[in-house]
Amino acid sequence: MNKKIEATKRYNETAKLYDKRYGDIQIRKYQEVIPEITISDTDLIIDVGGGTGLLSDYLQNNSKNIFICDLSFEMLKEGKRKNKEGHFICADSEALPFRNDCCELVCYFSVFQNLESPDLSLSEGYRSLKPKGRIIVTVLSKLFTQEILEEMLNKNEFVIEKSCKLAVEDFAFIGKKK
Ligand SMILES: C[S@@+](CC[C@H](N)C(=O)[O-])C[C@H]1O[C@@H](n2cnc3c(N)ncnc32)[C@H](O)[C@@H]1O
């Protein structure tokens, strides 16, 4: 089965359980990575593969300016149930529905394992970011090496500012658009 269809089906079927199963672990990732950058209250943020909007729950001060994009409608519905004011958008990471140079931060928390083309998704993130805008990517360390991710980010012209192994599951990367 096509990877996109497979992932969408799986997340649609398990959406109601997602926060209970993965909430704590995802929050631990945000707690380690987010303090590494400065986010102002007016920054526009795109949360690619943002699922049920856990990142938006975590970044309460910014939640009005976060656009949560995901292919799974059921994951987005769960998010909307928690946060009626949130901006939940059903969209593919390979074709983000945003203008060029429109936001300050693009995040991909634990999304790459589902993607057919992480490269294409990264190029969409790059396109949507303002010059000097930041990107955060975390990937499952059992599926990706740090070198492969750094290569992908470099190929997409991001300048890598920080990369590290998180306490739980993932490698994390912070980069900047030139
Ligand atoms: C492990 S979850 C991570 C959710 C969220 N980032 C978090 O921190 O809780 C992976 C998410 O990626 C989404 N996803 C998979 N393929 C996608 C694609 N091509 N475009 C957008 N979202 C996708 C899934 O539907 C799922 O919600």
Image: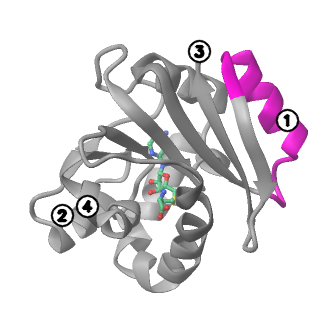
Look at label 4 and name its amino acid: Asn
Q: How crowded is mark 2: few (under 14 residues within 10 Å), some or many (20 or more)?
A: some
Disc number for residue 178? 3
Residue at 29 percent of width and 25 percent of height? 97
Look at label 3 and name its amino acid: Lys
Which of these two is toward me, 71 or 57?
57
Q: In which quarter of the image is residue 74?
A: bottom left
Q: Disc 2 marks which residue?
A: 80
Query: The C terminus is located in which quarter?
Result: top right
Among the two numbered marks 2 and 4 on one chain, the one whose residue lies closer to the N terminus: 4
Look at label 2 and name its amino acid: Lys
Look at label 1 and name its amino acid: Ile
Q: Distance between the residues labelled 1 and 2?
A: 34 Å
What's the magenta region? 141-159
Q: In which quarter of the image is residue 91?
A: top left
Q: How far apart are marks 2 and 4 (CA)?
A: 17 Å
